[in-house]
Image: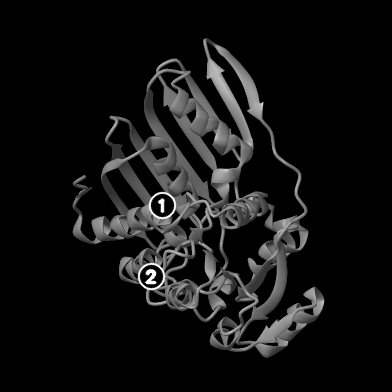
Amino acid sequence: MKRLGTALIGCGAIAGVHLQAIAKLGMAELKAVVDTNETVGRRIAQQYGCDYYADYREMLKRSDIDVIHVCTGHYLHAPMTVDALAAGKHVLTEKPMAENKASAYTMLEAAAKHTSVQLGVIFQNRYNPASIRMKQAVDSGELGKLLCLKGIVTWYRSPQYYESEWKGRWATEGGGVLINQAIHTLDLLQWFGGEVESIKGSVSTDALEGVIEVEDSAHAHLVFAGGATAVFYATNAYGSNSPVEVELVFEQGRLHLLGDTLYLHRNGTSAVLSEPVPNDLGEKSYWGVSHACQIRDFYEHVLAGRPYPLNGPEGYKALRLVTDIYESSRSGQRIRYHH
């Protein structure tokens, strides 16, 4: 099987998950890592037996690199992605695709212009067995019409977490709990619920006041074109990282996801439809185990020359909802979409 030359930009916390997945993938050969911190970058390069660059632009000049993984701070996703696409490289970027809509547009434009390469956006939770089963239930209509949904994220982030130079600031992170942690759950709600007709929400800084400029808590109400409604709540102000909760209520039953366990409740009985998949991520287990599944899927599409479905426009949907909750919170108004 052909192997694609791969490079990763940004050797922070999430990089390890990508690097492990690349190492186990028969379709990829890691050629280079890039980080502005030379000590960290060189250590990772040595660990994975590849080259190190301090400047990603130097790495982009290489003809033996086909795919770029962007794992940097949010504000760097857009410029790096635009440059990589222009250099003829496929790009798989971590979520959120950018720190705001304007930056995301530059990525969408670049992807539309450079059609020989693909842009993928990481939303690994769509690849969880439970998520796939829930999506199947919505699409098949096996439980009747979808009536309402809820998503709840109650996590904890310490003041120390925000000592990173880009986190906790509007200009560089683009927001707080919504854009960084809870965007996955918001993405699942819109993936299950379909086209969003309107959204209203508000954000506040409850526990980390004086530490961050951005929010640590948020809630929202969504109305879908199909008639379903959703409520959504997220906070980093809890004392612990609780399992994420997602519920879908249908005419003939209810699917309840708690962490990685999916329950079906109907006619007074309960059944477990899917259980947690073991993982080797240790304390970061709440990131889920599906990065490797998504990365494999992206490479399979690239190698087969098929359009990758979780592309720029698809990855943009959750970012739009996040930024519209911020807008709604500022204006006090419901944001309506015209399709």
Q: Residue at x 40, y 65 (%)?
A: 111
| Residue occupying image coordinates x 60% and y 31% | 262
Mark 2 → mark 1, Cα distance in angstroms: 15 Å
Q: Nearer the viewer, residue 59 or 99?
A: 59
Q: Which element type, helix, strand or loop, lies under badge 2?
A: helix
Inspect this view and state whether residue 48 appears: yes
Marks 2 and 1 in Cβ contact (< 8 Å) = no
Residue 318, image x and y in percent? Answer: 40, 53
128 horizontally vs 339: left or right? right
Q: 284 or 226: which is nearer to us?
A: 226
Question: Which amino acid, mark 1?
Answer: Glu
Residue 191, position as x, y percentages in the image: 43, 41
Query: Image check: 256 left or right of 203?
Result: right
- Give percent across and percent down for residue 24: 77, 58
Q: Residue 245's x, y, as percent?
A: 53, 39
Q: Residues within 10 Å of mark 1 (few under 14, many from 20)?
A: some
Q: Is residue 168 visible?
A: no
Please name the residue that numbered disc 2 is placed on. 110
Q: Residue at x 57, y 51 (%)?
A: 124
Residue at 31% across, 54% down: 202
Q: Secondary structure at mark 1?
A: helix
Q: Which residue is mark 1?
A: 314
